[in-house]
Amino acid sequence: MAETLSLRHVSAGYGETVVLEDIDLVLAHGESLSVIGRNGVGKTTLLATVMGHTTLHRGEVTLGGASLERVPIFRRARRGLGWVPQEREIFPSLSVRENLTIGARPGHWTPERVFELFPNLAARLSSMGNQLSGGEQQMLSIARALLTNPSVLLMDEPTEGLAPVLVEALAAMLRRLRGEGALSIVLVEQNSRVALAFSSRTVVMDKGRIVYDGPSAALSADPDRLAALIGVA
Amino acid sequence: MTPAPVDWSEHPAAAAMARRHRLRAWEPIPWVAALAFYFLFPKYLGFGTELLITVLFAISLDLVLGYAGIVTLGQAAFFGAGAYTVGMLAKRGIWNEPITGLILAALVAAAVGLGSGLVLLRTQGLTLLMLTLCTMALLEEAANLAHDYTGGFDGLDSLPIAPLLGRFEFNPLYPTTQYLYVLAVLFVCFVFVRTLIYSPFGQSLTGIRENTLRMHAVGAPVRRRLVLCYALSAAIAGVAGGVWAQANAYVNLGTLGLDRAATVLIILVLGGYGRLYGAFVGAVAYMALSHFLSKIYPTAWQLGLGLLLVVIALFARNGILGIAEAAAHRLRTRATP
């Protein structure tokens, strides 16, 4: 399968501080990938580096074979990177509809497709961004990123702060999303159960490095190894 | 198979949203009041003309400050650019037709806004605030030094402005033409700004104000949009300056001064920024208070105004309109069981 996103020997961080060290990661066209690890191991920084929010000290990030070096954030988004941030970052004084259309571009993802995935949003089009519940905000954040019609969707801990019942609902939606079109997805998740169920391939990070890159099933089947890798009992 | 595009307008919630952007029942009130003022207070039309120009100037500031979140202290630079464009062209006999004169004022002010915006909007916060102030000071000093063209400290007086539409004279003593002309200009500019802020471009400005990084991440060329907004706002400020020069047949360094820039900022904060009508409310409140306080306490009227501003800043950060909105919200909440 053709690669869509690749990071080769990437070291990056914030200013002089290096957070990611020697990251090698290739994502194929339409492939889904989960990234797990403890707090502070560099998962969010990995996504931020792809989006261009960090300082790239070494290595190269490419999208569809083209280097993203010196490419500003908005052009990365236009080239096909969609980002669902950890904090959701809904525009509070814009309506749901305005939040959705603000970055929409033509392509596979239309409002209708998005509403099939998130029917709640269709019913709340006229609500303002700050009137939504946490779960609805998360759905809106994902829907807004989808409507930019990305080729790679970067999701940063979408289940964070949600009630267990909402986590289950969102996990089901994410699994549906995985099968849609040729979208490649990188899911960063603290909830290893959700992450391992989401994709067939999982990356485990520790201290800014990738310490495991392989089948999710192998980790699901070996809880001791998983616990050793992510440092939990 | 790709599904057919959604027709948002058919969705009940979308229709509700569209209603939000439609003309509301109370929106004609300021315009009716402005027309009524013309008939009820013929002796105060000079004051009324100044008030309407101030509203227009405040609307230009609201576009950059209230909607795009660009903090500026240099909006008078564009007001002055428009005023001097009209003044110099008329004084030298090059162009004195009022309506096309305003278009030229808008173009010159927009060019100044575009040029300065391309440089200034690379910065933000305090640096941006200082740079906008410096730009205005530089223009003011340039106008002071270019005495042969601008009249320097004395300014340009007795501007020979041609009759409006070839028929209606601008009489400084009986400013009936000026009042109606400025009202018409304000209306056209207001409709333009209102359309702009409810357009996708306007929504993206709100997005930029609320979360710049997120707007980058959805693919919006943030800086380009800010510069465009800055230039459009400059054009409107230029129109305000141009119409001020035409109405007064006069232009001086005061059009480029910090006093004017600070006053319009105070007006907007007083009325409520980012609310479109805050400019109207703020200008009326500020100018009416100034007018009456200066009559009551000729020597210390600014003290009363200052105290009011302190109260507004402490207890009503969203200005007078914010107080009204909060009161209306409380009433609605109380009415709902």
Image (tube, rainbow, N blue to C red):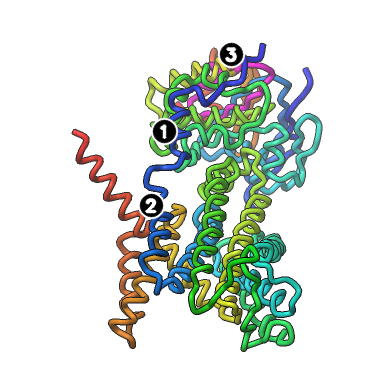
Tell me the quarter of the image containing the C terminus of chain B: top left
Q: Amino acid at mark 1?
A: Ser
- Give me the residue at 59% from left, 76% from top: B256
Residue A122 in view (yes/no): yes
Where, by quadrant of the figure, is residue B71 drawn?
Answer: bottom right
- The kind of secondary structure element at disc 1 is loop
> Could you tell me residue B241's position as x and y percent?
59, 69
Mark 2 crowdedness (10 Å alpha carbons): few <14, some 14-19, many ≥20: few
Q: Which region is colored magenta? A: A178-199
Residue with the mark numbered 1: A127
Query: What's the distance in space between the residues labelled 3 and 1, CA to CA?
Result: 41 Å
Foreground residue among B166 and A38: B166
Residue B119 in view (yes/no): no
Q: Tell which subunit mark 3 falls on.
A: A
| Whether marks 1 and 2 lie on the same chain | no
Give yes or no for residue A190 being in the magenta stretch: yes
Q: Nearer the viewer, mark 1 or mark 2?
A: 2
Q: Amino acid at mark 3?
A: Ala
Residue with the mark numbered 2: B29
- Give me the residue at 56% from left, 55% from top: B189
Where, by quadrant of the figure, is residue A9 drawn?
Answer: top right
Q: Nearer the viewer, mark 3 or mark 1?
A: 1
Left or right: A143, with A184 as reference point: left
Q: Tell which subunit mark 1 falls on.
A: A
Q: Tell which subunit mark 2 falls on.
A: B
Vertical placement of B281 versus B207: above or below?
A: below
Residue with the mark numbered 3: A217
- State if disc 3 and disc 2 touch (CB < 8 Å): no
